[in-house]
Amino acid sequence: MEPFVNMVPYLLVECVGSDEERVKHTLEPYTYERVTVGVPQCRAGDCGVFALNYIECHALGMSFPPALCNKNSKAIREKMALDIFKETPEGHAKDGVGYI
């Protein structure tokens, strides 16, 4: 984790669009915590789904809902795939006409 907690602040500073936004970010490394209690024990391949949902909940200041569990992992994965697809140019296409 150490490379990431040190690298992400630099990426944010480099990727922001304006100097006004750039000054809002510091180059201080992030802190992290490994959560082991209350985290679903997932099948191979489910960890990304749970990690993204955990990041979303954390960013919104929400606790990890009990509905995000192994029992619902297939439905969660399908919803996430659909949400991501809707954000692609093909997902925004009308009447079956895609963008090039």
Image: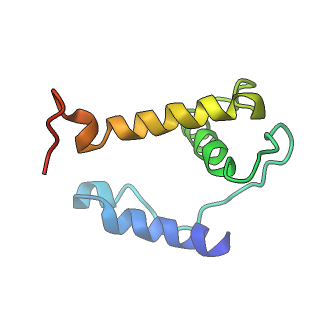
Residue 19 placement: quadrant: bottom left
Q: Position of residue 89 (x, y in %)?
A: 23, 43
Nearest the viewer among 13 and 85 is 85
Q: Quadrant of residue 66?
A: top right
- In the rendered view, tell whether residue 59 sits above or below residue 100: above
* Relative horizontal placement of residue 50, taking residue 82 as reference (left or right): right
Residue in view at x 60 percent, y 32 percent: 76
Q: Residue at x 42, y 59 (%)?
A: 25
Residue at far right of view = 37
Which residue occupies 24% across, 58% down?
17
Is 98 on the left-hand or right-hand side of 48?
A: left
Task: Left or right? Give the position of 18 relative to 84.
Answer: left
Give the answer, above or below, for where 40 lies relative to 6.
above
Residue most extreme to the front = 96
| Residue occupying image coordinates x 60% and y 62% | 30
Q: Is residue 45 above or below residue 85?
A: below
Question: Is residue 95 toward the left or the right of residue 42 in the image?
Answer: left
The percent coordinates of residue 80 (x first, y second) are: 50, 36
**Along the line of sight, the residue nearer the viewer: 54 or 46:** 46
x then y, percent, for residue 91: 28, 36
Picture mark count = 0
Q: Quadrant of the N terminus?
A: bottom right
Colour pattern: rainbow
